[in-house]
Amino acid sequence: MSITPVISATGLFTPPESISNEELVASFNAYAEAFNAANADAIARGEVTALMPSSAEFIEKASGIKARHVMSKAPILDPAIMAPRWSERPNEEISVLAEIGVAAARDALARAGRDAADVDAVLCAASNMERPYPAMAIEIQDALGIDGFAFDMNVACSSATFGIQTAADFVRSGNARSVLVVSPEICSGHLNWRDRDSHFIFGDVATAVLVEAVDMAPTVHWEILGTRLKTVFSNNIRNNFGFLNRAHPETRDAADKLFVQEGRKVFKEVVPMVARLIVEQAEKLGIDPATLRRMWLHQANAGMNRLIAQRVLGHEASEDESPTVLDTYGNTSSAGSIIAFHRNNEDMAGGDTGLICSFGAGYSVGTVFVRKVA
Ligand code: COA
């Protein structure tokens, strides 16, 4: 007999440092000015294109982002560096990605009143792993003292929802009773801070979701009513960094080895795809989309979320119906919808139905319909 999977708790780690749009733009513009001065002759000859200044006003208007948390603020803002920097850790010390994942996982375990010894599996579901192997998830499992199995999975911005479905399937099949889905996202490491079109997009964070069999869950939990995943190949969000870059050293440090996107196309193509998937899945589950109490949407762009929520609910969503964390966190890839859920679910009543939804590179879309039990 299939066992009902639920979300027992979520956890969050937020880096203490944050960069405002104004700080970010001052750094970018200092870099652009220095670049233009250094290349003045080539620019005058038409051989090099001058860099245009960035603007805090544009960033907030185009994306809804006002600030982002980061793991290493000063080097990102230093016009001579514009990347995070910290010392490489020896193998005996916990990796940076695992460390923030563990912090989020401990938060989730504490909220559920769960002993790590009762957890069976850990999925590290994120856009970028710190190394190919051993799996980040196994390092997190070890740091938490979990006896079981662990593996990494990457579906870019949809990693967490794909992880939730995987964990729910483990619980349904009896392969695990308690599964941690951990999403450490150090997006500052793959963002091109020198690219005017995208330098404002990402922030760093880690989230954790504890998915468990209903019979071991705390009294207050979220029943997972149904999940649906979809992927459609697209080059419009792409990062070509990888181990085979060593095979062509001449382009190893090119801009395409960081995040690159066609933002307009992404906006246009992903909005209808997401709205359709949500409505179809709601119908399949016998849920009238207009009755959803709250949608915790992926946090990439406030305009995208406005349009998706409108198509699903049939009216302009209030902040209460579709909460935003984009303003202070920026886009945190797979963690975004989980942060939104984590920070905006306690006020909901038993019986309330909601939707966690992610979308992004791949393209990938993940929906998780949940109902509060209290
Ligand atoms: N500061 C000031 N102006 C800027 C700028 C910046 N940092 N970056 C771009 N602009 C300018 C452009 O040069 C362009 O000027 P023009 O009209 O004179 O040519 C104008 O602003 C519009 O640029 P565009 O890139 O079309 O902006 P946009 O409205 O599409 O907004 C995004 C850009 C990235 C915010 C938006 O496309 C987006 O969020 N898309 C979805 C992305 C997404 O979800 N990706 C998933 C990531 S995981």
Image (cartoon, grey):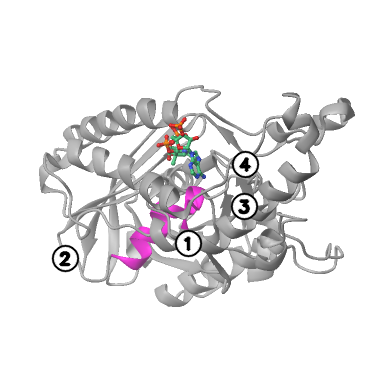
Above/below status of 33 relative to 156: below
Foreground tag (3 vs 2): 3
Residue type beneath disc 4: Asp
Distance between mark 1 and mark 4 Cα atoms: 17 Å
At 62% from the left and 41% from the top, the residue drawn is 195
Give the mark nearest the N terminus, 1 or 4: 1
Give the mark nearest the N terminus, 2 or 1: 1
Give the mark nearest the N terminus, 3 or 2: 3
Looking at the image, which is closer to me, 259 or 334? Answer: 259
The label on residue 29 is 3
Give the mark nearest the N terminus, 3 or 4: 3
The label on residue 67 is 1
At 49% from the left and 43% from the top, the residue drawn is 157
* Most frequent secondary structure within the magenta stretch: helix
Task: Determine whether label 3 and label 2 are within 8 Å by CB.
Answer: no
Q: Secondary structure at mark 1?
A: strand
Q: Where is residue 321 drawn, in percent x and y?
A: 19, 55
**Residue 12 visible at all:** yes
Residue type beneath disc 3: Asn
Above/below status of 246 relative to 11: above
Read off the magenta span: 330-344
Looking at the image, which is closer to me, 331 or 48? Answer: 48
Side of 111 where 71 appears, left or right: right
Give the mark nearest the N terminus, 3 or 1: 3
Residue of label 2 = 350
Q: Where is residue 89 drawn, in percent x and y?
A: 83, 65
